């Protein structure tokens, strides 16, 4: 059974930093793209950043220059370093990971349970 376990959320003041981690386990297949999504209160869940298995990152415009996504394939772990945090970054952050077949075809997508990030002004 595939599990994604997030950690590192918390409460900070604007301008502060947090580092999120997401450890994936339980798959006999490789993990492909991994990413972080954010869901603010009363809003839909939106992609914040993603990274390919080859470590090519992608960011939503609102976090470019402030957030850095990275991964360690040996540990099946993805990280999100969040700097210069703003109140609008507040929300529940969810980790997402795809599994791939031997031929690189996407099999399924999995979600973590979410971790709360609160940024106060």
Image (cartoon, helix red, strand yellow):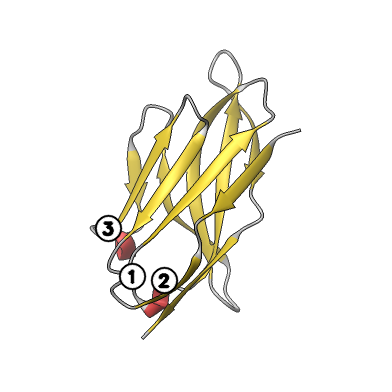
* Mark 1–mark 3 CB contact (< 8 Å): no
Q: Quadrant of residue 28?
A: top right
Q: Quadrant of residue 101?
A: top right
* Mark 2–mark 1 CB contact (< 8 Å): yes
Q: Earlier in the sequence, mark 1 or mark 3?
A: 3
Residue 39, image x, y percentages: 55, 67
Residue 32, image x, y percentages: 51, 30
Residue 108, image x, y percentages: 66, 34
Q: Residue at x 33, y 70 (%)?
A: 85
Q: Residue at x 30, y 62 (%)?
A: 83
Q: Residue furthest right?
A: 1
Q: Residue furthest top?
A: 102
Comparing marks 1 and 3, which lies closer to the viewer? 1
- Relative to 31, is 88 above or below? below
Q: Residue at x 34, y 64 (%)?
A: 17
- The span from disc 1 to disc 3 (Cα, nearest Å) is 12 Å
Q: Which residue is mark 2?
A: 89
The circle drawn on residue 85 is 1
Q: Quadrant of residue 16?
A: bottom left
Helix, strand or loop at label 1? It is loop
Helix, strand or loop at label 2? It is helix
- The span from disc 2 to disc 1 (Cα, nearest Å) is 7 Å
Q: Residues within 10 Å of mark 2 (few under 14, many from 20)?
A: many
Question: In the displayed structure, does residue 80 sit left or right of residue 38?
Answer: left
Q: Which residue is mark 3?
A: 64
For the residue pair 74 and 68, the one nearer the viewer reads as 74
- Relative to 61, is 110 above or below? above
Question: In the displayed structure, does residue 32 sit left or right of residue 2?
Answer: left
Query: Which corner quadrant holds the C terminus?
Result: bottom left
Helix, strand or loop at label 3? It is loop
Q: Earlier in the sequence, mark 2 or mark 3?
A: 3
Query: Which corner quadrant holds the N terminus?
Result: top right
């Amino acid at each position: 059974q595939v599990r994604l376990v997030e950690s590192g959320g918390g409460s900070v003041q604007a301008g502060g930093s947090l580092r999120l981690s997401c450890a994936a386990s339980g798959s006999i297949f490789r993990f492909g793209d991994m990413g972080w999504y954010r869901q603010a209160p009363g809003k839909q869940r939106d992609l914040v950043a993603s990274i390919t298995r080859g470590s090519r990152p992608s960011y939503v415009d609102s976090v470019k220059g402030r957030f850095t996504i990275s991964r360690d394939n040996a540990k099946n772990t993805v990280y999100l370093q969040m700097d210069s945090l703003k109140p609008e970054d507040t929300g529940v952050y969810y980790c997402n990971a795809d599994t791939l077949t031997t031929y690189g075809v996407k099999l399924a997508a999995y979600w973590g349970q979410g971790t709360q990030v609160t940024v106060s002004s």
